[in-house]
Image: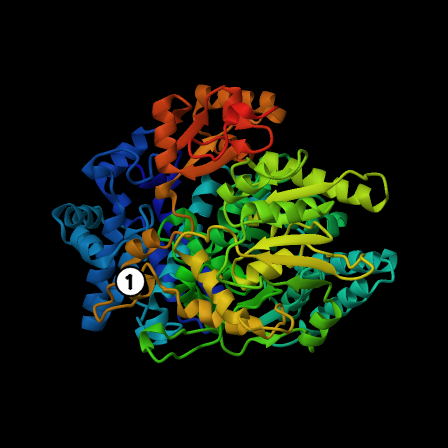
């Protein structure tokens, strides 16, 4: 009789179970220095595929040539399920060996094993009912009747101890997800090695933390040697020295509070690499709130580390272009589980992984242990998810060997706060150490702008008046709060005024920003004397290195005004200071977080006669803002609170924790004329072969997100097609994508036909 298989192609089941158990245990040793988690991870690996011993499953698997035949749910049929058996075996075995304590503890393994294909489930209205059903009980009985080896069934050395959970009851759900991550990554890796023996080797070859640390130090020395002797560069050097020195401090929470343009990007990387080397951290994860600037940051890092080769980091986000440089076999594999020393990613990827239930998202979670996480533009942490995010960061730092660095010019007030209403209390990040020794002195030294506030916060200024003031300047950037406002203002400005908004696809915005940078450079050298005026939404406020002498900013949160000011006299080249004009626009943002941020700004600055961007004002602003916002709007924290029977709502919490709500938005592939040939080629591939991963990544630079209601309306009108669920395509009509303004919507305030191409 043929030995039971784990996968087609002769992969023996007993060998697979032992290999996954051992690697899962090895991963768990990394997340738990006390060794309290390793037994759980070992048994999860040993029993995860116990149901594959079923005779019906073996007959199906041995007759199949499909490499995906082992994946539960790929093929219907009661004999083709296998993930419930190990969960039930854990409950039966540990209950027999350890009584009620064992039966309760076995639920940890039940969550992990039963979810290793479909994802972590809720206990009630989910996993409990599934494991109580006749199909699951039959699955276990058939697996037992097949008489698996004693080495697979044995749990003699395991003593369940629920008192040793990192973080106790508060950390239970996170700990279970960590074990789950260890299991599913080990399972993927062993399965991968069976089907492609050369694949594990392709995961290796990245430069080490120490190699990157040395290469960055050399690069920074070269930059300093070639830098001009300006006050800005002097203080950038000071920031760097303090980051390098403070990296020797013990792990925990740090903040790097540096004015915009103070060199925090490379200095924060220097801190992270030096700290990681000093304390044996295994990777640096650099998280950025906007996909629009992540590529720029990754390119800065690649340039700094170029002596180590092109493949020095992993750039993991939804809109990474699939070019040869960053879409090699090694980088694709490392994106799956972040098994690389330097990851540049988005807040969406990082935080949704911390609360995920699906295997693909959870797989990388255990790699965060013993790491340095840098949160760039920390003020952009989403307020409606702030409390669960801070809870997770506290668990990572206190129990999983993580150091967190908060980088921004406008530090949010994230320390614990008690309010008169206890339900509004904030469990924050306490003991955060500031890297800069005298941040107020640094801010004063790098003050490069004067801010003009509106004389009356309650009176709006008409667009016509704002347009006249902007027209009076020959080099000016105006930032407004909505795409509609950007077009309304632009309509009133002289011909040649540039426009930026998210209705332009990424490739279009990138080209306009490059044009702006080139013209600013040409103006400084005297080669461009034409007026340069730009109207933009807030997409230019973080990470876009442009430097205007004058910036107009519509009323917004105080942090947004500070970010806008960072686009003014950024390099300190003006003889005096730059000018930032804050104005009250004809219409405030719609009710929601942007409106509350604007109101908190008014409250903070009302009657303020000194510097409105003084560092001390931001704590007051953020406390005011956070007090007006529900910091756990989706009730994630209660869902993850463990009940006495160890019930947790894993699936519900994961579904609720969506930083980008896809339900109300639609993705449209536009026909951007400058890249027309490339877009048509990609769309032809989509029609011919369907939505392959590489293809969808290559289409990302040509997409625009709009409200689902508008997409449905435009589809009915024939302006869009729907070649696949969830992806719309603009029809080949010239008047639907404007060369200056992007996608034309029915709700636009202008007449598209009136434009001169």
- Say whether residue 22 is visible: no
The residue shown at (51%, 50%) is 481
Residue 482, image x, y percentages: 50, 46
Asked whether, in this view, residue 113 is left or right of residue 565, the answer is: left
Asked whether, in this view, residue 228 is left or right of residue 692, the answer is: right
Residue 24, image x, y percentages: 43, 57
Q: Nearer the viewer, residue 233 or 637?
A: 233
The residue shown at (58%, 64%) is 455
Which quadrant, please, contains the C terminus?
Answer: top right
The residue shown at (57%, 45%) is 464
Residue 73 in which image quadrant:
top left
Total count of labels: 1
Q: Residues within 10 Å of mark 1 (few under 14, many from 20)?
A: many
Its colouring scheme is: rainbow
Asked whether, in this view, residue 712 is left or right of residue 561, the answer is: left
Residue 459, image x, y percentages: 50, 58
Which quadrant, please, contains the N terminus?
Answer: top left
Residue 726 in which image quadrant:
top left
Residue 688, image x, y percentages: 45, 19
The residue shown at (69%, 64%) is 450
Q: Is residue 193 above or below residue 450?
A: above
Q: Secondary structure at mark 1?
A: helix
Q: Nearer the viewer, residue 75 or 368?
A: 368
In this view, which residue lies farthest toward the left? 134
Mark 1 lies on residue: 639
Asked whether, in this view, residue 725 is left or right of residue 699, the answer is: left
Q: Is residue 619 above or below residue 116?
A: below
- Say whether residue 350 is visible: yes
């Amino acid at each position: 009789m043929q030995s039971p298989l784990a996968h087609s192609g002769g992969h023996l089941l007993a060998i697979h179970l032992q290999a996954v158990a051992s690697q899962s245990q090895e991963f768990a040793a990394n997340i738990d220095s006390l060794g309290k988690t390793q037994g759980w991870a070992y048994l999860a690996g040993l029993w995860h595929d116990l149901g594959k011993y079923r005779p019906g499953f073996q007959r199906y698997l041995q007759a199949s040539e499909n490499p995906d035949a082992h994946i539960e749910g790929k093929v219907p049929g009661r004999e083709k399920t296998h993930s419930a058996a190990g969960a039930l075996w854990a409950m039966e075995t540990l209950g027999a060996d350890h009584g009620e304590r064992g039966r309760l503890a076995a639920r940890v393994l039940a969550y992990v094993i039963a979810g290793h294909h479909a994802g972590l489930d809720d206990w009630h209205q989910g996993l409990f009912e599934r494991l109580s059903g006749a199909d699951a009980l039959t699955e276990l009985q058939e697996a037992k009747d097949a008489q698996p080896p004693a080495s697979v069934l044995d749990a003699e050395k395991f003593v369940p101890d629920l008192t040793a959970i990192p973080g106790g009851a508060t950390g239970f759900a996170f700990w279970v997800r960590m074990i789950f991550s260890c299991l599913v990554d080990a399972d993927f890796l062993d399965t991968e090695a069976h089907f492609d023996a050369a694949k594990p080797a392709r995961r290796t070859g990245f430069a080490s933390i120490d190699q990157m640390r040395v290469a960055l130090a050399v690069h920074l020395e070269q930059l300093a040697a070639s830098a001009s002797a300006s006050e800005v560069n002097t203080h950038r050097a000071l920031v760097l020295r303090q980051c390098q020195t403070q990296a020797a401090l013990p792990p925990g929470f740090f903040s790097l509070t540096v004015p915009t343009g103070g060199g925090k990007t490379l200095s924060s990387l220097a801190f992270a690499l030096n700290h990681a080397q000093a304390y044996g951290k295994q990777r640096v994860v650099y998280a950025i709130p906007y996909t629009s600037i992540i590529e720029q940051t990754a390119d800065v890092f690649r340039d700094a580390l170029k002596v180590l080769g092109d493949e020095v980091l992993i750039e993991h986000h939804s809109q990474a272009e699939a070019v040869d440089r960053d879409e090699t076999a090694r980088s694709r594999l490392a994106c799956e589980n972040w098994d690389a020393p330097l990851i540049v990613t988005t807040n969406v990827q990082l935080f949704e992984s911390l609360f995920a239930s699906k295997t693909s998202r959870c797989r990388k979670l255990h790699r965060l242990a013993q790491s340095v996480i840098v949160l760039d533009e920390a003020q952009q942490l989403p307020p409606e998810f702030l409390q669960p995010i801070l809870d997770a960061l506290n668990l990572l730092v206190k129990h999983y060997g993580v150091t967190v660095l908060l980088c921004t010019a406008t530090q949010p007030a994230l320390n614990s706060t008690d309010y008169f209403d206890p339900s509004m209390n904030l469990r924050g990040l306490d003991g955060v150490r500031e890297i800069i020794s005298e941040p107020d002195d640094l801010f004063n030294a790098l003050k490069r702008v004067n801010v003009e506030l509106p004389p009356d916060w309650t009176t709006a200024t008409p667009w016509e008046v704002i347009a006249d003031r902007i027209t009076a300047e020959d080099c000016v950037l105006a930032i407004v709060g909505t795409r509609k406002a950007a077009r309304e203002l632009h309509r009133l400005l002289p011909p040649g005024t540039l426009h930026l908004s998210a209705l332009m696809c990424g490739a279009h915005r990138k080209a306009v920003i490059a044009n702006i940078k080139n013209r600013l450079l040409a103006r400084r050298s005297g080669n461009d004397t034409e007026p340069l005026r730009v109207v933009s939404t807030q997409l230019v406020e973080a990470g876009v290195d442009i430097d205007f002498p004058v910036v107009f900013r519509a009323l917004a949160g105080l942090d947004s005004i500070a970010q806008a000011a960072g686009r003014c006299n950024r390099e300190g080249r003006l003889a005096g200071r730059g000018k930032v004009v804050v104005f009250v626009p004809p219409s405030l943002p719609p009710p929601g977080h942007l409106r509350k941020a604007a109101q908190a700004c008014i409250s903070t600055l009302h009657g303020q006669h000194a510097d409105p961007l003084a560092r001390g004002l931001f704590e007051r602003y953020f406390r005011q803002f956070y007090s007006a916002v529900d910091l756990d709007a989706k009730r994630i924290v209660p869902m993850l609170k463990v009940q006495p029977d160890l019930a947790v709502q894993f699936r519900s919490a994961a579904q609720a924790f969506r930083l980008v709500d896809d339900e109300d938005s639609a993705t449209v592939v536009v026909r951007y004329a400058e890249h027309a040939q490339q877009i048509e080629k990609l769309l032809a591939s989509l029609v011919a072969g369907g939505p392959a991963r590489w293809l969808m990544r290559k289409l990302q630079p040509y997409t625009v997100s709009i409200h689902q209601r508008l997409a449905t309306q435009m589809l009915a009108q024939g302006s869009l097609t729907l070649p696949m669920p969830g992806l719309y395509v603009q029809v080949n009509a010239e008047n639907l994508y404007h060369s200056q303004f992007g996608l034309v919507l029915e709700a636009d305030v202008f007449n598209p036909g009136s434009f001169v191409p």
